[in-house]
Amino acid sequence: MKTIRLLALAGLLALMGLASSGVASAAACSPGAVYDPACDVDHDGDVDVIDIQLAAGHWNQNGVWTAGDYWSLIGNAATNPAVNFLGTTDNQPLVVRTNNTERMRVTSSGLVGIGVANPTDQLSVRNTGAGRAGFFQTDNGANNAAALSAVVQNGNGSALFASVLDAGNSAPGLYATTLGTGPAARLEGNTQIWSGQLEVREDNHQIAIVDDNNGNKTWTLTSHQGTSGIGLWEDATTGRFVVAAGGNVGIGTLGPQAPLHVNQGANDGTD
């Protein structure tokens, strides 16, 4: 450790052409005190200004305070995201704690875990509390769907692939805006191009293919409880094909009165 070496001989100082006032005080450091730089004489007679050791173990050679690199509790200014960051520079994870308990972890390989100490995916979330959502929960006053959205690989449109329960206890569902190769349908099982959607409902036991949101050009396959039977509809209100609960089959009518009941409008025939 460097120390302040004082020249005790006034005669030697006089030979060097230095005033005695240039010698640093040997008194202990105190707040607000001003100290002159200490002088040292090398073996060759040169005069050097040496470092001064301050009270807290800091060294200041040129008298200019250098601010340390730190994150302030009240925020930082003049930051540069290219060089400033919150994280680690060694092969160790970044851990976020509250109440001295780990809440989130970013591993050295970039995997994020919330409630998971050793995440194995890009984002791993675990909530073991009873009656709580395992992944996330949304609560708003509007009639909006809470969902996850995924952009398709070619960037053309997006796929909404999951929905969540809301305060009204509506049924959760699975919904895709695009599925398949170049489809315009909501759900597609082959390469055919559709302009509608496939909808499965639990409340009225039906599968519907709808051309638009207004219910026009609808094909509906229903399996109602009780005595309603199974029906195939078009245009929402027009029955095209019905198998009644009693076994009667109707074409063009929703209430077949015979094993095969065909309704052609003005010409009504019953077999």
Image (cartoon, rainbow, N blue to C red):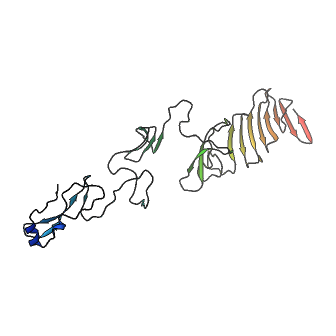
| Residue occupying the point 59% across, 49% down | 159
Residue 126: x %, y % from top left:
48, 36
Q: Quadrant of residue 166?
A: top right
Residue drawn at x 35%, y 56% is 69
Counting every numbered tag in the picture gives 0
- Between 68 and 7, which is closer to the camera in this rendering? 7
Relative vertical location of residue 48 with respect to residue 73 in this rendering, above or below: below
Q: Residue at (91%, 38%) from the top-left corner?
A: 268
Across and down, in percent, residue 38 comes to 18, 63
- Could you tell me residue 267's position as x and y percent? 92, 41
Relative side of 30 to 174, left or right = left
Outermost residue toward the right in this view: 266
Q: Front-most of 235 and 102?
A: 102
Viewer-proximal residue among 256 and 45: 45
Give the side of residue 7 with respect to residue 224, left or right.
left
Give the residue drawn at x 61%, y 40%.
Answer: 164
**Quadrant location of the C terminus?**
top right
Vertical arrangement, residue 173 with respect to residue 53, above or below: above
Q: Nearer the viewer, residue 73 or 128?
A: 73
Q: Quadrant of the N terminus?
A: bottom left
Q: Position of residue 207 (x, y in %)?
A: 70, 38
In the picture, residue 80 is in which quadrant? bottom left
